[in-house]
Image: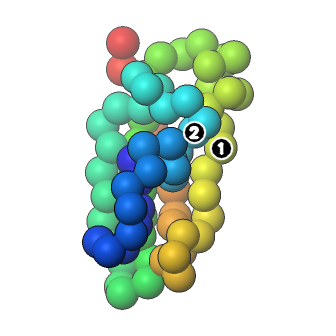
Amino acid sequence: MNLRKAADDFNQRDFLLGKHNWNSFADIEVRWKGPKNLEVSYRWRGDNPDHKKMNNQTVPEKGGVRVLYVLKEDVPIP
């Protein structure tokens, strides 16, 4: 998942969730909470503790937008 202004170039490695987020997250929902707050809800795709540790990186703010993260019930999707 990537957050940027429409005029900015797309950087496919500029993630909001995780360092290596391919197949890491599932059931992602994004909802604006006002003009400067974005809520991202997600589940882990698997239950591997090493995988969770490696991908537990989040970005709290991007381009003046505060990003709030909500981990849904800890029931991983296979």
Where the C terminus falls, by quadrant? Answer: top left
Name the residue that disc number 1 marks.
Answer: 57
Q: Position of residue 21 (x, y in %)?
A: 49, 32
Q: Residue at x 69, y 16 (%)?
A: 50
Residue type marked 2: Gly
Q: Earlier in the sequence, mark 1 or mark 2?
A: 2
Q: Residue at x 62, y 19 (%)?
A: 51
- Given contact means CB atoms under 8 Å apart, are the residues at marks 1 and 2 in contact? yes
- Residue 75 can be seen in this image: no
Q: Dot 2: what SS?
A: loop
Number of the label disc, if any, that sits on residue 28: none
Say few, some or many: other residues with alpha carbon within 10 Å of mark 2 (under 14 / 14 to 19 / 20 or more). Answer: many
Q: Residue at x 33, y 43 (%)?
A: 28
Say few, some or many: other residues with alpha carbon within 10 Å of mark 1 (under 14 / 14 to 19 / 20 or more). Answer: some
Q: Position of residue 6 (x, y in %)?
A: 29, 72
The relative height of residue 76 versus residue 31 in the rendered view (above or below) is above
Q: Position of residue 19 (x, y in %)?
A: 60, 36
Q: Dot 1: what SS?
A: loop
Q: Position of residue 29 (x, y in %)?
A: 30, 51
Query: For residue 8, what is the image quadrant?
Result: bottom left
Q: Residue at x 57, y 39 (%)?
A: 18
The relative height of residue 19 versus residue 66 in the rendered view (above or below) is above
Residue type marked 1: Gln
Name the residue that disc number 2 marks.
Answer: 18
- Residue 40 can be seen in this image: yes
Would you say 11 lies left or right of 31 here? right
Q: CA distance from mark 1 to mark 2?
A: 5 Å
Of 75 and 13, the residue lying toward us = 13
Query: For residue 60, what is the image quadrant?
Result: bottom right
